[in-house]
Image (cartoon, helix red, strand yellow):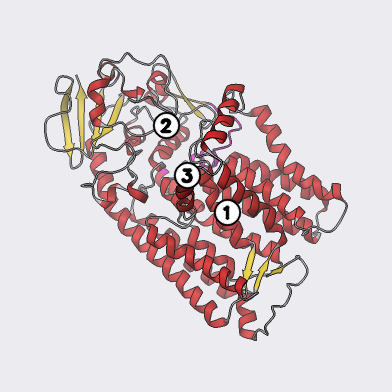
Amino acid sequence: MHVVHPPAPRPAPPETLTAATVAWHAGGRPWLRWAAAGLLGLLLTVPLLAVRIPFLVDYPNHLARMQVLATGAGTPALHAMFRITWAFIPNMAMDLLVPPLAHILPLTVAGKLFIAASILLPPAGTVALHRAWFGTRSWWPWTAVLAAVSAFLVYGFLNYLVAVGLALFGAAWHARRTGRGEPGGQALTVAGSAGWGVACLLSHIVGFGLLVLLMASTELGGGLRRGGAMRRLLPLLAAALVPLALYKAFGPAHSYTSAGTLGQAVWQVLHLGLLSEPGFRARWLLAGFTGQGTAIGAAAAALVVLPVAGAALRRRLLVAPGMWLAFLCLCAGYALLPAVLADNAMVYERLSLPLALVGIAGVQPVLPLVLLRALAVAVVALVGLRSAAMTRLWSEQAGLLAQVEAAIAPIPPGARVLAVRDGDSPWHTEADEPASHRILRRTVAYQHLPALVTLEREAFWPMIFTAAGKQPIALRPPYEQLAQSDGYMPLTRELAPAVTIPPPPGRCGMVAPEIPCQLWSWPQRYDYLLRFNAHDGPPPDPDHLREVRRDGWVILYRVQ
């Protein structure tokens, strides 16, 4: 295994390479690179054309918030529910970009453009960082397209994905400027680094942390050998401190660093982290490659891991020194952090994608030409197969969306709508539900479809994303008292025992009680009930519910 110190030429591998192999490692001709990029970009994004609203778990909820922001909560019904609370929030790339686009494009089109950005930015950033670290182009980092459709895309973590892509691009920009002495002066380098830090922190906290870690890793790895220590340190400090200062000055009133929350976070790290759930952590390492199915995800991971392992065994693996600190810190964080930290879920899981992309960007396996060509064909074929599978699934799910839209048509603006689903498991689909109802490991795919009542009917649903410090919209009374920050869609069987429970005194937190508090005293608090995965038979509570409309797997009831 060889270590590369850009911008110096890469060390020659122990065996003589043919001219054709060198050409392949150099990334080929420009027209070929552009043609390949266009083909892969088309394959990755063509499923977006299959459905008006892509079936990503959180996406309908995000799109409902975009509707509120795009209209400025200007309609009477939305104004009665929401108020806009702009602040420096580390989770609002979509909130800043999609509403302005919605003034010139249909909202659904603007939303799909943002989804396309969340698909394309992470692999493109990986290619850019690999070039910055190695000082030359290569086809190898293009294998990052295998991680473009990940579990995080399927779950709808769009701000997170955009932030990861921005962090990789920002780290590549920093490595090129400070490592090669590009013109523009120190002031431009410091200002640009601060700008990348602000963009990443506004997008998502994981992207900001990844940017700072990659910049520090590049410095420590020896890629920056010009100028004094302070000259090299200033861009890193600007990228880290300027965004934090802006957050301190203009951030939301709610803070996750309060004493109670900090104590809770420490307890969670000590009791829920530290190598807990080793089997689950091992499976989630595939999350960066697993989109709609684990079989395709395992094949995608194998196309990355096997060439690296084979090249390492043959001592033909080049490694960028700027990778080591970042890669090892991501490994440590993945092993030690808990799944839930403060009020944020899926914490260590979100490190699996940066871990994969940094690993791809930081190595260069030198392979025989025949293996390189076979790898390229396999990558394109697998991307095409995954695209076809996703297009087919989303086409099937378009029918589910149409049934929900038909069922909610009678709901008037301003109505309060509760949503439940038939089943026994809060998070997993039942055995008799079709494949279109679920995503990875039988997770319920339609958890946030009730947000369509806000998006299309200007009605209220208690799980709209309005958590303080996470989104730039807040609820007005009395809707605030109905809201639940996060959790699962309540089960139909939980309606009966919740009738006699007094209403909660305030907004429900993220971790709900045994019976979700949005259900408490529900006949007095809601106007309609939307029932998903509905089975034949009488209403779950005939004394309080009257059926209004039934369409396939969805039933709308009027609350008496």
| Residue 512 placement (x, y as % from top left) | 40, 26
**Which mark lies nearer to you, 3 or 2?**
3
Discs 1, 3 touching: Cβ within 8 Å: no
Check disc 1: other Cα within 10 Å, few if <14, some if 14-19, many if 20+.
many
Secondary structure, mark 1, is helix
Q: Which of the image's four quarters has the C terminus? A: top left
Q: Amino acid at mark 2?
A: Asp
The single residue placed furthest to the right in the displayed view is: 228
What residue is shown at x 28% (from left), y 50% (from top)? 436
Q: Earlier in the sequence, mark 1 or mark 3?
A: 3
Q: Is residue 255 visible?
A: no
Considering only vertical position in the picture, is 198 above or below 140?
Answer: above
Q: Earlier in the sequence, mark 2 or mark 1?
A: 1
| Residue 173 placement (x, y as % from top left) | 70, 55
What residue is shown at x 47% (from left), y 44% (from top)? 277
Q: Amino acid at mark 3?
A: Glu
Give the residue pinned by disc 3: 277
User: Magenta part of the protein: which range?
Assistant: 85-107
Q: Which of the image's four quarters has the N terminus? A: bottom right
Check disc 3: other Cα within 10 Å, few if <14, some if 14-19, many if 20+.
few
What residue is shown at x 67% (from left), y 65% (from top)? 131
Labelled disc at residue 486:
2
| Residue 196 placement (x, y as % from top left) | 67, 46
